[in-house]
């Protein structure tokens, strides 16, 4: 009788797992890019650090999940109505020490590892604005996120922002390849989120605050720029493009765009004068 009970439990367990796997595969979507395990293609100099953190988090999660599932499955199969239940409030010193020890081990191995690598990544790359500002090749861009568009502003030939020869673009941000790009991000209305999946970069645009971010693209091409924060009824319209050009193509575009901007400048068009003098002190 005991073997029949175990067989019945195993049968229904296999059926449940099969149904779960079938339903999961039915909802799976085809990914447009393959840059890892369903990741967008990484074209950044430090994106591999972000991918590693995601991968190791998934590995730890799967391991802990498998342990818990195995533990519950063994308990489910081994115990049946013929075994008398033993109730325990778990407040003995032995149980408390076991729980604390397991928690400490998991915290040190999993959370400690993720925390340490995150701090190193932030210090060496993501928040290392000193390295970026010290580079003479760094391109500085002011980005104004608003309902519902991305406005970008570049210093013109005079090298100063908020002057008549400033270059402005809408929903398309050209940048040179293999060059640090330093962005100061702002918003005049609500919170938006500047998201470049191929550069592993995301930063909120908060009204009244200038938020800095930087990235460096390693491949030319057109890449998605999205708003990752719901910002109103037309949030879906905030799809932009990061256009990574060769250095020569970017230099030619920038030079001509500055000439065109100076010709088209209208001091009475106050709506076009949204730029601000560049401030190095906002870099963290």
Image (spheres, rainbow, N blue to C red):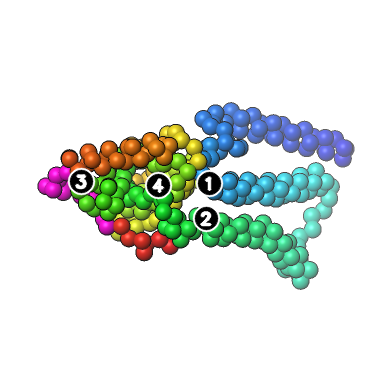
- Write down the region rendered in magenta: 265-277
From the image, state whether disc 3 or disc 4 is nearer to you. 3
- Disc on the earlier residue, 2 or 3: 2
- Secondary structure, mark 3, is helix
> Height in image: 114 above or below 220?
below
User: Looking at the rendered structure, which numbered label has been put on residue 45?
Assistant: 1
Q: How many marks?
A: 4
In the rendered image, which quarter contains the N terminus? top right
Task: Give the spatial CA distance, label 2 vs label 4.
Answer: 18 Å
- Secondary structure, mark 4, is strand
> Height in image: 163 above or below 42?
below
Query: Which residue is labeled 2 in the image?
Result: 125
Q: Is residue 76 visible?
A: no
Task: Give the spatial CA distance, label 1 vs label 2.
Answer: 9 Å
Whole-percent x, y for residue 154 in the image: 31, 47
- Disc on the earlier residue, 2 or 4: 2
Q: Is residue 267 magenta?
A: yes
- Disc on the earlier residue, 3 or 4: 4
Judge from the rendering whether residue 210 lies leftward or rightward of residue 59; answer left or right: left
Residue in the picture at 56% in, 60% down = 119
């Amino acid at each position: 009788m005991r073997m029949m009970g175990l067989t019945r439990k195993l049968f229904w367990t296999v059926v449940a797992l099969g149904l779960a796997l079938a339903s999961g595969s039915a909802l799976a979507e085809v990914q447009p890019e393959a840059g890892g395990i369903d990741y967008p293609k990484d074209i950044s100099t430090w994106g591999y650090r972000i991918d590693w953190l995601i991968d190791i988090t998934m590995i730890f999660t799967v391991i802990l999940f498998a342990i818990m599932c195995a533990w519950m499955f063994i308990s489910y199969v081994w115990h049946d109505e013929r075994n008398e239940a033993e109730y325990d409030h778990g407040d003995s010193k032995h149980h408390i020490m076991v729980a604390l020890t397991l928690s400490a081990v998991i915290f040190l191995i999993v959370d400690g590892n993720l925390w340490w690598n995150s701090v190193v990544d932030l210090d060496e790359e993501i928040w290392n604005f000193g390295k970026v500002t010290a580079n003479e090749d760094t391109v500085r861009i002011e980005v104004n996120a608003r309902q519902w568009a991305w406005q970008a502003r570049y210093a013109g030939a005079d090298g100063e922002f908020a002057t008549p020869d400033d270059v402005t673009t809408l929903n398309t941000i050209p940048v040179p390849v293999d060059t640090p790009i330093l962005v100061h991000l702002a918003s005049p209305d609500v919170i938006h989120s500047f998201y470049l999946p191929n550069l592993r970069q995301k930063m909120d645009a908060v009204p009244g605050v200038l938020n800095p971010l930087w990235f460096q693209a390693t491949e030319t091409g057109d890449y998605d720029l999205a708003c990752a924060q719901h910002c109103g009824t037309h949030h879906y319209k905030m799809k932009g493009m990061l256009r990574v050009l060769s250095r020569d193509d970017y230099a030619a575009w920038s030079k001509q765009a500055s000439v065109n901007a100076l010709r088209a400048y209208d001091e009475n068009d106050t709506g076009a004068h949204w730029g601000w003098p560049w401030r190095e002190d906002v870099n963290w």
